[in-house]
Image: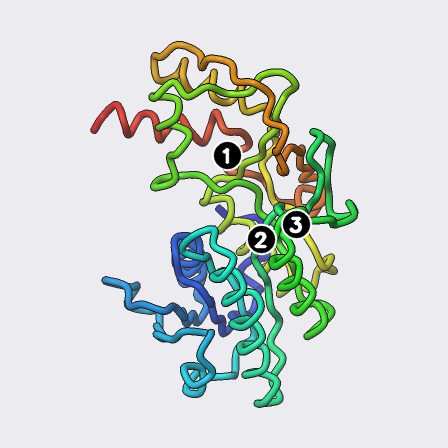
Amino acid sequence: MDYLEDEKTLKMATILIVGCGDIGMRLALRLIEKGHDVTGLRRRSVEKPHPAMKMVIADITRTEDLEALDDHFDQVFFAVAPDSRDERQYRAIYETGLKHLLSHFSKKNQTPHLVFVSSTRVYGESQGGWVDEETPLQPKDIIGKLLRLGEEQVLVHRPDNIIVRFSGIYGPGRQRLLRLAKEGAPVQRHPPYYTNRIHQDDCAGVLVFLLEARLSGKTLKSCYLASDDAPASMFDVMSWLAGALGYDPPPEQALDAEAVQNKRCRNDLIKSLGYVFQYPSYREGYLPLIDDLDSA
C-alpha cells in the first residue's frame, strides 16, 4: 500500500535492516519492491531470501562479527527480536548489541539515520489510562527499562533518529489469543484490563511510511507510537474471538493485582502524518486468521 503521492520522485536509499525476523523480512520485501537497495543482518541464515536482498550473517553482540559489515548506508532499521522474554537476552541486544552497532558506524565516521523498533512496554501506566508520545516513561519491569535504555542510546547517537513503539504484534504465526479462545481460558472482566494491538503487516507499513516521509523531506518527530485504532479490554477481545470461532464467551477471572500493562494507546501522531492502518482493529486483522483456520 502506498501512502505518499509523490513516491515516484523519491530517491532510492541504501538500507540495512538489523534483525530480519518476521517484521524485518516483511519490511525488506516491501522496500525491495519499491526499488531500494536492501541488506539484511541476522544471526542465522534464512532459507530462500529475496534474490535482490544481500544477507549478512552476524551476531551484533560480537564486535568481530561486525568488522566486515559495510558502513555506507543511508538508513538503518533496528528490529531485533529476542528469542524469549529473558533479561539476559534483552541486555545482550539493547545494551551490548546496540552499543556495538552504533560504535561500528562511529569508528567509520558514519552516522546513517536509524529507526529503532521499540515497544509500548516502556510506559508505566497500569490503571487503564491513555498514553501517547508525550506520556512520561516509567517502565515497571526490567524489559521495559532495557528497551528505554536502547531508545536513549539511539537518540544520543543522532538526535533526529526515530523511535517507533509498537503495541502487541499479531498476525500469521502469532495466534496465541486464538488458542486461548479455543481453550476457554478465563479472562479478567472487571475492572477492564485494556490491551492494544498492531498487525504485523501494519508494522512493516509504518516503517516504510516513515522512511518515505523522511526521504520526501517531511519534518518528523523523534518518536511515534504505532498501535491500531481500537484499544479494547481483553475480555471484549476474547469474547469476540470466541464468538467468531463458534465458542462460548470466556469465563471471568478474578482481578490480577500484578498487571503492569493495563493502558490504552493513542495513535493520533502517526495518523496525523498520513498513515492509514490496513487493519484498523483486531476484528479486521483476526478475521483472515480465523478463515485460514477454518480452511485448514
Residue at (40% x, 17% y) in the render: 242
Q: Are marks 3 and 2 in contact (CB under 8 Å)?
A: no
Amino acid type for the residue under numbered disc 3: Val
- The residue depicted at 41 percent of the width and 70 percent of the height is 41
Residue 216 visible at all: no
Residue at the outermost top position = 248
Residue 172, x across and y down, in percent: 35, 40
Q: Tell me the CA gap for discs 3 and 1.
A: 24 Å
Q: N-terminal of the two: label 3 or label 2?
A: 3
Q: Nearer the viewer, residue 233 or 201?
A: 233
Q: Which mark is residue 143?
A: 2
Counting residues from the start of the chain, the first of labels 3 and 1 encountered is: 3
Quarter-of-image position of residue 292 = top left
Residue behind mark 1:
279
Q: Residue 225 placed where, x, y %? A: 65, 46
Tell me the SS state at disc 1.
loop
Q: Position of residue 29 (x, y in %)?
A: 39, 58
Mark 1, Cα crowd under 10 Å, few <14 / some 14-19 / many 20+, is some
Residue 206 seen by the camera = yes
- Quarter of the image where one finds residue 161: bottom right
The residue at the point 51 percent across, 70 percent down is 12
Select label 3 or label 2 by which is in front. Answer: 2
Question: Mark 2 or mark 1: which is in front?
Answer: 2
Classify mark 3: residues with Cα within 10 Å, few (<14), some (14-19) or many (20+).
Answer: many
- The residue that disc 3 covers is 122
Rounded to the nearest angstrom, the CA distance separating label 3 from label 2 is 8 Å
